Image (tube, grey):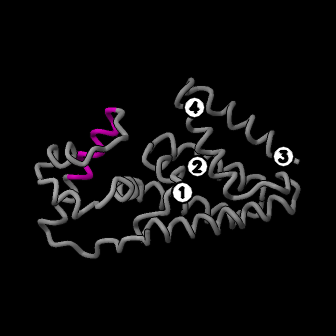
Amino acid sequence: MSPLTDPGPLRADSARVRAQMLTAARARIRDGDLDLPMNAIAKAAGVGVGTAYRHFPTRQALLEALAAESLAALVTDAVAGAADPDPAAAFTALLRSGLQLLRDDPTLAAVLSSTEPPCLATTTALNAQLGAAVQTTLTRARAEHVIRPDVTADDIRRLICGLQHAVAAGQDDAAERYLDILLAGLRP
């Protein structure tokens, strides 16, 4: 599936409906429901199901719209880390930032761990920027023997999503300990 064109400037009523749907979806997420049934979201937003699907043709498109702000923040942190002169500090900061953003926004975890290609062009672009920044950080960290030479950007994505899941399933105060264990396992 090719990425959907992101909505350009929306008419005021269309922007309002989109915002209502995102608010309704966020309320479900706060209640622990990541299934995001479109019928329930449409009802909570006070719109018809057809209108809901016009804005978000798939659940994945809705998840990506919900996660866009957090994904952009992760990209910003990754780009800053790629420019950090200390590859060890940059790598640690990348993992710490990623874990915190994933803990704060479960939709980001769903988007990053998805096996489906992105639905929205914005997500595709942000993923490309994130991948490039992470790759730069990894290349520098490998060169300085901060991490094992076989660690890939995809490994980092999967490991940080797994770490977020472990923290969510366990105790919040274990996050730093889990992060330390992960970092120790990635060293050469």
Foreground of the two, 64 or 116: 116
Q: Dot 1, how many residues are within 10 Å of its Cα: few (below 14), some (14-19), or many (20+)?
A: many
> Where does the magenta region start and end?
21-31
- Residue 73: image x %, image y %? 49, 58
Q: Which element is circle 2 on? A: helix
Is residue 106 shown left or right of residue 82?
A: left
> Do labels 2 and 1 touch, CB within 8 Å?
yes
The numbered mark, 2 or 1, whose residue comes first in the sequence reads 1
Query: Which residue is identified by label 4?
Result: 167
Cα separation, mark 4 vs mark 2, equals: 13 Å
Q: CA distance from mark 2 to mark 1?
A: 6 Å
Report if the CB atoms under discs 4 and 1 are less than 8 Å apart.
Answer: no
For label 1, the residue is 74
In terms of sequence position, does the residue under pointer 3 or pointer 2 come before the other?
A: 2
Between the C-alphas of marks 3 and 2, the distance is 18 Å
**Residue type marked 4:** Val
> Which residue, given by chain and number where applicable, does mark 3 sit on?
187
Q: Amino acid at mark 1?
A: Leu
Q: Earlier in the sequence, mark 3 or mark 1?
A: 1
